[in-house]
Structure formats: structure tokens, C-alpha cells
Amino acid sequence: MHFAFTDEQAMIAETAKAFFAEQVTSERTRAAMAGTGVDDALWKALVGELGLAGVALPEERGGAGLGMVELAIVAEEAGRQVAPLPFLASLCLAAPAILAGGTDEQKKLLPLLAAGDLVASFAMDDGRGALLAPHGATADLYVLSTGDGVSILQRDAPGLSVVPLTSMDQTRPYARIEIGDAVPDPLADPRAAVAAALATGRLAIAADALGGAQACLDRTVAYAQERVQFGRPIGSFQAVKHRLADMMVAIEQARSAVYWAACAIDEGSDEAQFAVHAAKAFACDTYSHCAGEMIQLHGGIGFTWEHDAHLFFKRARSNASLLGTPDWHREHVAQLAGLDRAA
Amino acid sequence: MKLGFSPEEEAFRAEAAAWLRSELEGPFADVRGVTSLVEMPERRRDWEKRLGEAGWSCVGWPRAYGGRDATLAEQVIFAEEYARAGAPPRLNHIGIELAGPTILAFGTEEQKMRFLPGIAKGEEIWCQGYSEPGAGSDLANVRTRARREGDDWVIEGQKVWTSLAQFSDWIFMIVRSEEGSKGPKGLSFLLVPVDQPGVAVRPIHQITGEAEFNETFFDGARTGAANILGKPGDGWKVAMGLLGFERGVSTLAQQMGFRNELDAVIAAARANGEARNPLIRQRIAKAEIGLRLMRYGALRMLSGAEGGTLDPAALTYKIQWATWRRDLGELAMDVLGVAGETVPGHDYAFPLLPNLYLHSRADTIYGGTNEIQRNIIAERALGLPREPRGDLR
């Protein structure tokens, strides 16, 4: 038992942190928001020079052969900058589904996904009607889970219709997928595919939320140090200090949750399912809270389009909704805690 | 990063669990499941001694001082098995978790040899003399005085909220040793025997009806000149080091015990049907998640501290567990309904969960209130400006 990064993990974290901090700028992100929701240069650099896009894919599938802890590290650092990337859709949802449940032929897609030569997305019929795929408009193919099974569909499949939608979080825009009479290519093991996609995707969202929440705190602390009212920095008022302290209390718990879940999946622990539900619920709630506090503590400027606070606030909302809200995950925790066993 | 335990560690777990089971199903069956700190004090002293004899009292300490040299993982395992076995709260928890580690960190070799084995063997029970009527959150405002007289320190003044002083052999305290000094300067950290004519202990009854803590009066109380940790005037530094222990490593064992309280809430909810109430389910799920996050937060902190420094995240720990437990008390009462507010007989003594509801109100106060914790987090971890001081002293 050693619940701290290894030297190698610490190095990956440092590298990823520096990479996203350097590459992601407000200006470039806003250009992506006005366009496809992807910063193409950033995406090319991530799949190219950084070499960590396919972090959790096996080396023989074009990945780095690492685990969920390393995937969470990359997602956390991307989340810290609200990076406009199809990393979640392509490499944390579609790729794990294909790896776990694809046919040998379908698995040949994996090196192409890891290298960014192809981009995939994932959508699941959640009973609310539409199939909504994150970064769906720019994807080349889709892993779709519907009542009819789990299949791959190519973007150019005859009959398939992809409708880009204006989305609240413009760094992760959705497209509506209408299968129509397109002919799907079914996965060999749909259950394994969905389980892997949901576990990896939920973990990645939780890690993204952790990084985002930390950024909200860091940026708000910096603002509270410099903004002067009543002749004092506003960060000297307990009304402000205590709210910032509460953000940190929540964030540190979210950090424990995310890396607990990552380790639990990697180690095949009995707790893995519980941990993923816990991490998704807790980290997303924390991000929503911290992003809301960021706006509140910045005052009027925090409500403007010009300030970046809304990027975090909207990503937090996207994270909370995608693949199960915090309440939904907590209900699953309640079941796993044995509340339905007879007294 | 690795959470699983090795086969050797699992073997340690089996050994600890077997020993605890044999004691708590055998000679100490009467204290098994006891949750109050003050019930059956004589048997609790016996239990401390039994743990000490068998080398299970202060497992993380060096063997030379009566410990077991246990690794971090083994300390975690023992704490978990201790709670799982239904073993009672440690009567000497202040000695084990606060006095001992402080003596280990700041004591001379003579002091370590004099005091640590007594704690590890369960022979000397300790309490903490920090707060005073005029020094609560503003701890540096202590007025209890100590002066040198021959080979002794002589102490005059009053401490308050001294938990378990009525059972204690020793008290560690901060005193003002420089006449006319103010604030954190001029304080010293003394170790003082409780059983002497100059010390009077008067229990304070708390909202649960129990009396765990006391007012402690010092009227010409004496302790040997050697019984000072650090130098005269170092008291604040030593005391702050101790608060670090209180927030950090030491509370792990206590939190393992929270599992039993949450299990009791779940059992009650399943028994009376509240487990089907979606709102209660959400709150139980939150408590379950919070409990895990305390465990993994502690493991993260301790694993990180193996490198020698405590992560600033450790500063968030006290407020986290205190608030969790207060919330659990409220949840417990909402699950129990009116029945939880009643108890048969004439004694004002409530069972586990209603008592938790009342008792947990102290958690967000002692050892630094939630508000003080937030100041500490904001100032030390986030680097925000310090709270301006007033001049009404």
C-alpha cells in the first residue's frame, strides 16, 4: 500500500501539467469554441509530441501501456485548462469500448485513434430519447450503445445522420446521431464494451472535474489577493477566505476519490464500481460548487463572456450531466452499500 | 500508486485480528462494543495495560520505547482491525496520539525513555492542558503561569476542557513562563503530574449528560525542572507541532471507528423502512462516500508524509471528519424519528446514535473550531492575508 504517485507518475503529471499550461490559451480556446469545439493544434500536439493520448491503451494497440492512474493524470491536467479536445470521447469512451468488446478487425482502429489519425465518439441511449455524442460533429466514427446492441458506425455510413448542436459547453459540443437505415458493425462483446467505456469515461470525467475545480480555486485565490475593496484585498475577509477554504476541503476529497477509483480499477479491486460512482458524484459536485463560487467571488466580471469563469462553470455542468448525474451515482452507491438487503 | 496490501501485510492483519478477537471474546468481552470514553474506567485501564503487554498499544512507535516498529500499512491495518473487532475507544488516546508523538518529536532521550514506555504499556494516562477560560480559539492568550523555584516549576492558574483529566496521571500544558510576555512568546511546554495537592480536577457535564472533560486548577502545583519539552519560551512551537499531529496522522484510528457508527445508522434505516426513502438513501450514500474519502485521504496524506513532509492537504482533514460526523448525527436522528429522542429509565444517557447526535457537536469545536480551521487553511495552504488582530486582551 502506497497511495502516492510513483516517481514515474509524478513525472507524467508534471509533463502533462506543463504541456496543457503552455498550449492552452484563452484565445485559442475561444477560437475553438467559435468553431468545432476542438483546438486542432492542441490535439495534434497531444497525440503527437506528448505521446500520452493513448495512455491506457496497450503498447501493441498503439498506446503507452499505462493504467487508469496515468489516464486520470492526463484528464486532470486537461481539465485544469478546460482543454477543447476529443480526448474524452475518442480515447476515454470509444477506445476502451473497442478494446474491451471489439472484434479483432475493429481493434485495428485503436492505433489510429491513439495517433489521432481517426477520432471517435461514443453515445448511449439513456432513455431520454436522443443519442447525443460529445464532439460528435468532428468524429470519424461512433461507438453507439442502443437497445439494439453496441456497434460501430462510420461517419460516412449511408443513412447515418449527424446533426451538430449548439451546446452550452462549447469546448465539448454535442451532435445528435440518427442511425436511420445505416448498417451497424456490432461489437463482439457489447457488455464488456459498455462496462469499460463507462468505467473509463466516468473516471476521466471525474479527473477532469478535479483539475477544473482546482483551477477555479487557484484562479479565485489569485483574484482575491489582488482585488482591493474597503481598502483591503478581498481575500483578507473571512466571508471570502472561508469559502475558499471550503473549496479546498472539497477538492482534496475529490482528489482522493479520483485516484482511489483509478487504483481500484487498475488493481481489479472489489470496490472499483463503488469507487467510480463515488468519484463521479463527488468530483462533479465539487466542480459545480467551485465553478459557482468562482463566479460569485469574482463578482460582476465573473459573469461576463470575456472572463474565463464561464468556461469552467459550463464544463462543470457538462461533466455533471454526462454519464449520470451525481444523484444518480449516489443512488447506485446506496444500492452497493446494502440498503436494499432485508433488515 | 498502489492500494492493495501485500501477503505479508495481510498476514499481519490476520495476526492482529486473531489477537483482538481472542481478547474481546475472552477476558475483555465486557468492554467490547463500548463506545463512551468514560464508561468503566478501571476496565479501560486494564485494557490499555493488556494492549501494552502484548505490544499492540503504540504499534507505530520504535520498539525501544515500547512500540512495535509497525510500517504505515501495518498501522492502518491495525486501526482497521481494532475498529472492526468492536474494541473500545482508547482511554489513553491523548497519551498515544498527542503526548507520545510530541515527546518523540521534541523530547530528549531521557524524556523519551522516562515517558514513552509508560504510555505504551498503558501505565500512565495523559490529558492535555491547552484551553483556558480566556484562551480558546485564541490559544496564545494563555495566562496560567509557571516560575522556577529550586529544581521545580511551580504553576498557578486554570485550564478548561481538559478531557479525561479525572483518569489521568500526567498533563501536558502550555504555560506562560516569562513574566509580562504576551501572545505566543514566553510560553513553555510542561509535563506535570496530576495527582498532587496543587492540582484540582472538577468535571464539567456536557450536553450528552456525560462528563468527559474538566476544569483543572493549579495552585502551587509542581513539576521537576527537567519536565519541559523544548527550551523555556519554545512552548508555542512545540504546541503547534502537536496540533499538527492532532490534525494529521493520529486521527486515523478514530475514523476507522466511524464505520461502526455509519453501520448502525444503516441498520436502523433498514429496520424501520427509512432505507427506502430516496432522500435518506442520498444522505446515506453521501456518508458512505465521505467515509471512504476520509480513509483514502488519510492514506494519501500518510503515504505522502513518508517522504518527510505533510502535504498542505492535511490541513483540511479536521474539518472534513468533524463535519462528516456531525452530519451523520443529524442523519441518524432523521432515520430514528421520535423514538430516537427517548430512552427508558431515569438516567439521561442515550444509546449510540442519539448520543452521536449530541456528542458530534463538540467535534466541530475542539482541536480548533471549523472557523479556525478555515482560517488556517486559507492562510497556510492558500496563502491568503492573515486575520488582523484586535487589541482587547
Image (spheres, rainbow, N blue to C red):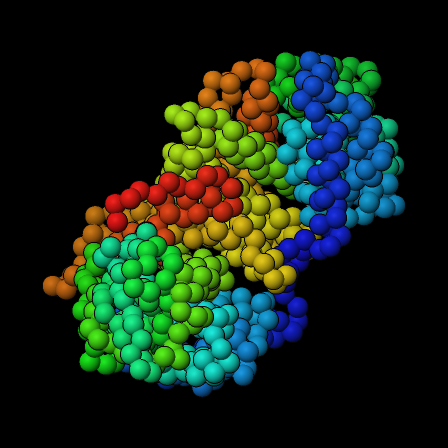
Q: Say which of A163 and A188 sits in front.
A: A163
Q: Residue furthest front?
A: B180
User: Picture quarter containing residue B41?
Assistant: bottom left
Q: Residue furthest left?
A: B346
Locate the N terminus of chain B by quadrant. Answer: bottom right
Residue at point 63% right, 65% down? B5
Residue placed most toward the observer, A107 or B134: B134
A84 or A300, which lies in front? Answer: A300
Q: Tell me if residue B259 comes above or below residue A54 in the rendering.
A: below
Residue at the (65%, 74%) spot, across then down:
B8
- Identified at 86% across, 42% down, the residue is A61
Residue A37 visible in the picture: no
Report whether B205 appears left or right of B248: left
Quarter of the image where one finds residue B283:
top left
x and y percentages locating residue B144 in the rendered image: 26, 64
B362 vs B216: above or below:
above
Q: Judge whether residue B135 can be spotted in this image.
A: yes
Q: Position of residue A156 (x, y in %)?
A: 82, 18
In-image side of A158 versus B342 (left or right) = right
